[in-house]
């Protein structure tokens, strides 16, 4: 099964993808995480991506699509994957459709997680991430047992550079799923919209109901 998770920055795509991957064993493919790994490793791709990420802008399609297609060409993506943060526009969606069609596959579900802007600001400002395992927390909504320390592996928690208020403002202006992208999946008959303002568990349950249905 191939699934795309759509939603504005901070909607809960990464959090829910981690939970769904744990429940279903589906491979979690996050273009944001791939870019951040490249930034950390100071690769050429990372240096280029950082110039866009720091401004709250999308990395150019050509670069992003090449990276994603390489990722899904690997054997662990043969049977299915859950895409988090990709596609962001119709150009990326069509590239993904074509790559899957070449394998005899297609997007089976497109899950749009909807959250209002006021809530997104508070979610991004309070987000903390484990440096070693990537587990996501929120300082009030989903806090770790001990501040600054990951419950799962004791790793140090950090805040993303692009969660600074001025970058969040730009991301929310420029990076919400565009209507034509939503229309692309609605026309394909695979779109479901989920209210992302429910509790973490309720959102997970709603997503799993659609996936398993
Ligand atoms: P990316 O990492 O994909 O960022 P994003 O789309 O902005 O999404 P986020 O990761 O910020 O939010 P999320 O929806 O995953 O929310 P989360 O689960 O963390 O991309 C980063 C950058 O890379 C982009 O700006 C761009 O430059 C580049 N990029 C990536 N993909 C690209 C592409 N395809 N094309 C071009 N450029 C690309 O949750 C947020 C917080 O809320 C957490 O603290 C969590 O605990 C909390 N929370 C979640 N759900 C709930 C809930 N139900 N109730 C209460 N709190 C909740």
Image (spheres, rainbow, N blue to C red):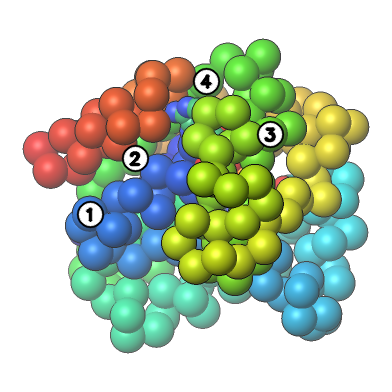
Numbered disc in front, either 3 or 1: 3
Q: Which residue is mark 3?
A: 126
Write the residue at 46% across / 45% down: 15
Residue beneath label 4, please? 115
Q: Earlier in the sequence, mark 2 or mark 3?
A: 2
Left or right of 2, for residue 36: right
- Spatial CA distance of label 4 from label 3 is 16 Å
Q: Quadrant of the C terminus?
A: top left
The percent position of residue 202, horizontal first and vertical second, equals 29, 26
Callout 4: helix, strand or loop?
A: loop
Q: Out of 99 and 113, give the one closest to the viewer.
A: 113
* For residue 26, side relative to residue 17 (left or right): left
Q: Is residue 26 above or below residue 187?
A: below
Camera sees residue 10? no
Asked if residue 35 is positioned above or below residue 118 in the image, the reply reads below
Q: Tell me the residue at 40%/54% (across/down).
A: 18
Tell me which corner region of the image, top left, top right, bottom left or bottom right, holds residue 137: top right
3 and 1 marks in contact (CB < 8 Å): no
Marks 4 and 3 in Cβ contact (< 8 Å) = no
| Number of marks in picture | 4
Which label's residue is closer to the chain start, 2 or 1?
Answer: 1
Disc 2: CA contacts within 10 A as few (<14), some (14-19) or many (>=20): many
Ligand 1 neighbours mark 3 (CB distance < 8 Å): yes
Query: Mark 2 highlights which residue?
Result: 110
Which is more toward the observer, 141 or 206? 141
C-alpha gap between disc 2 and disc 1: 18 Å
Q: Is residue 133 above or below residue 84?
A: below
Residue 143: x percent and y percent?
55, 38
Which residue is situated farthest in the left direction here? 213
């Amino acid at each position: 099964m191939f699934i795309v998770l759509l939603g504005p920055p901070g909607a809960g795509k990464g959090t829910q993808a981690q939970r769904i991957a744990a429940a279903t064993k589906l491979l979690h493919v996050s273009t944001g995480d791939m870019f951040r790994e490249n930034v950390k490793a100071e690769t050429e791709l990372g240096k280029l991506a950082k110039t866009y990420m720091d401004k709250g802008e999308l990395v150019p399609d050509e670069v992003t699509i090449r990276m994603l297609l390489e990722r899904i060409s690997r054997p662990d993506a043969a049977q299915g994957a859950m895409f988090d943060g990709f596609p962001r526009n119709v150009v990326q969606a069509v590239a993904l459709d074509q790559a899957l069609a070449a394998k005899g596959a297609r997007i089976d579900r497109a899950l749009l997680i909807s959250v209002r802007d006021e809530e997104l600001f508070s979610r991004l400002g309070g987000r903390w991430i484990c440096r070693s395992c990537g587990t996501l927390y929120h300082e009030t909504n989903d806090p770790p047992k001990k501040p600054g320390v990951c419950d799962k592996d004791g790793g140090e928690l950090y805040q993303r550079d692009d969660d600074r208020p001025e970058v969040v403002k730009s991301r929310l202006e420029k990076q919400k799923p565009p209507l034509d992208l939503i229309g692309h999946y609605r026309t394909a008959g695979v779109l479901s919209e989920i209210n992302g303002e429910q509790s973490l568990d309720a959102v997970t349950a709603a997503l799993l109901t659609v996936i398993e249905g």
